[in-house]
Amino acid sequence: GREEDYFQELATRMVDAKLGTLARRIRQLPQVMALDDWPSRLSQELGEIYLLVKAFQKLPALPDALQDDLLSLAGVNFKKEAILAKAGIQDRWLVAGQFFAEEDSNLQSRRTWLIGEQSGRIAMLLDFSWGGTGYESDWRSGSILDGEVVFYPSRLPLRALVKAHEVVKDQPFHLPEGLTDFKELEKKWAAAVGTLPWVWPWPAILDEVIPVHTSGRFLLVDKNRDALPLACTPQSGWQLMAESAGRPIRVFGQWEGEAFRPLSVVVEGGIYFLKSDEGKTI
């Protein structure tokens, strides 16, 4: 309809300006308007785009790291060679989980999460597949990488690249301590959004939590009996319940603003991976 033509025209102008990510967000607005909860979702999406545009108007006056964030959010790509030339963090890194999403009709993304054993840092490897051609690198969940990870410039560094590394086999991995209180997760999420309003998703390790199923929904319950809604398939939810068997467990995943998506679980020292359903970023 006319709305789709209008958004397509705007998206085309963004593509001409080499702002591909912003173009995709604009192109997806008609899909957002077709959702059941479209008023709130559309308001959120337009609010983030508006904030991004207003920030761009003040780009020269902003700190360098925030300028880099804005350029990346709009779709300006950094050269991998320049990132890899920077100093990184040497550690043993656990491939703690992956999340696949459909960014556009011919574009899929894969977020691979790494956790540093000594540093406690969490890094995200972001890869894209065009037209189902597959991904350039193969990161297997559960692998332990001994090597250097370099973070992209950002006010809130999460995205990273793996430099020189080797895969470690038959050695234990000591997962850093996580959060035992969902209120702490809320505080960290609020601080992250305050630092970078467009951050999504936010990774976290949750300790001493128990998965439950009630009223058709899966939840995690912390030591204070506070509940956290889960974004997961029934298959993943029941797998989480089975691994727990009513006992407190450790869960790694990503907070997506309204729900937590579990990607892996630690039970009695063993790590088990949950199959993540492919999602849309809209």
Image (cartoon, rainbow, N blue to C red):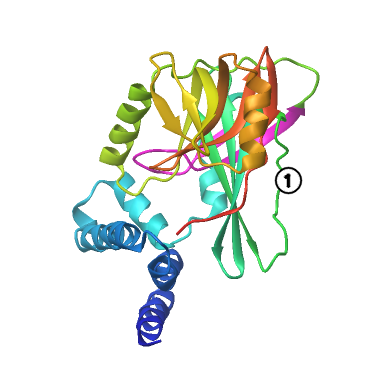
**Does the segment drawn in magenta span residue 100?**
no
Quarter containing the N terminus: bottom left
Could you tell me residue 18's position as x and y percent? 43, 72
Could you tell me residue 217's position as x and y percent? 51, 38
| Residue type, numbered disc 1 | Asp
In depth, the one of 64 and 282 nearer the eye is: 282
Residue 147 visible here:
no
* Crowding at mark 1 (Cα within 10 Å: few <14, some 14-19, many 20+): few
Residue 21 visible here:
yes
Quarter containing the C terminus: bottom left
203 horizontally vs 69: left or right: right
In depth, the one of 182 and 17 nearer the eye is: 182
Specify start and end residues of the magenta stretch as a single range.
149-167
The quadrant where residue 213 appears: top right
The quadrant where residue 14 appears: bottom left
**Does the segment drawn in magenta span residue 152?**
yes
For numbered disc 1, what is the local secondary structure?
Answer: loop
At 50% from the left and 25% from the top, the residue drawn is 205
> What residue does disc 1 label?
138
16 shown above or below 257 = below
Q: Residue furthest front?
A: 215
In depth, the one of 198 and 59 nearer the eye is: 198
115 horizontally vs 60: left or right: right
At 36% from the left and 63% from the top, the residue drawn is 38
Total number of numbered labels?
1
In depth, the one of 236 and 55 nearer the eye is: 236
The quadrant where residue 5 appears: bottom left
